[in-house]
Image (cartoon, rainbow, N blue to C red):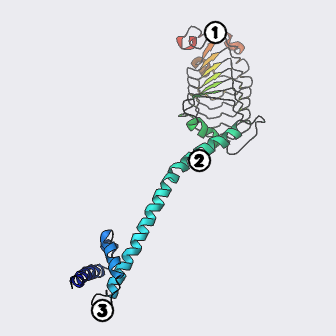
Amino acid sequence: MQNVEKHYGKKRKIEREALEWQQEGKLKGYLLQGRPLRDAKEFMQLNTDDPNIMLSSTAEEFVDTSTKKSKRDILNKAITIIALPITVLTPLVFHFSVLLIGSWSLYQENCSKNILNHFFLDYRLRFGGEEKKEISGLRLCGNNLSRINLSNARIHLISDSNFSDSDFSNSNLHGLILREVNMEKVNLESSFLKDVKFIEADLKGAKLAGSNLNGAVFKNTDLQEAELYLATLENAIFINSDLSAIDLDEKQIESMNFCNCQLPPEHIDKQNRDCSNPAVKVWI
């Protein structure tokens, strides 16, 4: 008798909650979960012939729907647990894959072209390595690197690299140090090259027209047949450089700093004009 009363009490509770669920439009927020759901499922499994204990169709639907939602919730949690490490690892896999493939492409001895080298170079100079501030040995001849922005690159020094015949037009290389770099016939037109240091660089036939070279340093740099017309050269420093065949206007000449340079005949008196300038002496 006591068990029957207990069963009646459970039935009434389930029926009451099922009715509330139905009246509220069968919203998920009214479904059973946790211990109440386990109790309801156990009640449904009772093997009894008492029709007074049998649940209504609405109550059975209520328990079944609650069970299905509970299973979905468990599955979603499992997926989240599995997906979390994948979500964390995917960027790492991408990062190291780009560096690995990029290394193969950026350092080929035959200096071949690759349309992805623009991306590989930008990515490597921004994110490659942990402490290294210098990168050397790049082989990027004839590549389209136009509009590349390396002004905030983590790498500050590029050395012993070959960029000959590449297109850097409209690029931002602000503040980079380019040492022993082959930039023969490179296109740097209309680029932002403020404070760039060209140290023992090969710029033969380089196109620098319209570029901002304010504060740039050219030391032991080969500038034969380089084009500098319409380039701004305010406080640019030229040391041990041959500018004798370069067409420079009067404004450019007055704004530049020279030390041990070869200049056109009409400006021969200025070839050592600025050797005593402290800003120049730092580089001598």
Q: Which residue is mark 3?
A: 51
From the viewer's perspective, is residue 212 above or below residue 250?
A: below
From this viewpoint, is residue 170 visible? Answer: no
Label 2: how many residues lie within 10 Å, few (<14), some (14-19) or many (20+)? few
Residue 162 rendering spot, x and y as whole percentages: 72, 30
From the viewer's perspective, is residue 59 above or below residue 172?
A: below
Residue type at mark 1: give it.
Asn
Give the Cα distance between marks 2 and 3: 63 Å
Question: Mark 3: which secondary structure?
Answer: loop
Pick out the residue farthest to the right.
Answer: 110
Q: Is residue 91 left or right of residue 24?
A: right
> In this orientation, which residue lies closer to the viewer: 107 or 48?
48
Of badges 2 and 3, the one in the foreground is 3
Residue type at mark 2: give it.
Phe
Query: Residue 272: which disc?
Result: 1
> In this orientation, which residue lies closer to the viewer: 14 or 269?
14
